[in-house]
Amino acid sequence: MKSDADRDVERIVNRTANRIAAEFDKMIADLPETAAGQMAVEEVVRKLTGLQPWSIDLIMEDPDIRCINSDLF
């Protein structure tokens, strides 16, 4: 059984993931037709690397995070 703290963490993580996903969808929808969505996503990741270097380091260094969706590739 999950503790209240675990449920709180799960709720916050889900909310944040949903917000980020919605913002990516909005960004892609707002781009001009001639713009490449993948390039825009790459630019967001590049910007995040400067703004949140610890999170990118975590993603790159933690094998558990890197292989979450490895079956997609």
Image (tube, helix red, strand yellow):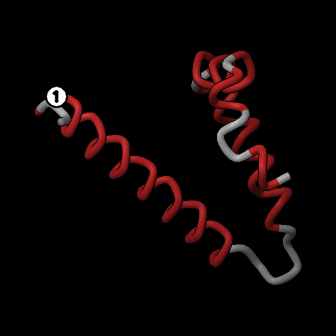
- Front residue (pair 13, 67): 67
- Residue 27, image x, y percentages: 62, 66
- Residue 11, image x, y percentages: 26, 46
- Residue 13, image x, y percentages: 36, 41
> Which residue does the image show at 74% across and 54% down from the upper left?
41
Instruction: Tell me if I can see residue 33 in this picture.
Output: yes
Question: Which residue lies under the disc numbered 1?
Answer: 5
In the image, residue 11 above or below residue 72: above
> Which residue does the image show at 88% across and 79% down from the upper left?
34
Left or right, 69 with respect to 52, comes to right
Instruction: Tell me if I can see residue 50 in this picture.
Output: no
Q: Residues within 10 Å of mark 1 (few under 14, many from 20)?
A: few
- Front residue (pair 60, 22): 60
> Which residue does the image show at 83% across and 60% down from the upper left?
38
- Residue 50, image x, y percentages: 68, 24
Q: Residue furthest left?
A: 4
- Front residue (pair 32, 36): 36
In the image, residue 10 above or below residue 31: above
Q: Residue furthest front?
A: 1
Amino acid type shown at disc 1: Ala
Circle 1 — which element?
A: helix
Q: Residue furthest bottom?
A: 33
Q: Dividing the picture into quarters, in which one does residue 55 lie?
A: top right
In the image, residue 39 above or below residue 1: below
Q: Dividing the picture into quarters, in which one does residue 18 lie?
A: bottom left
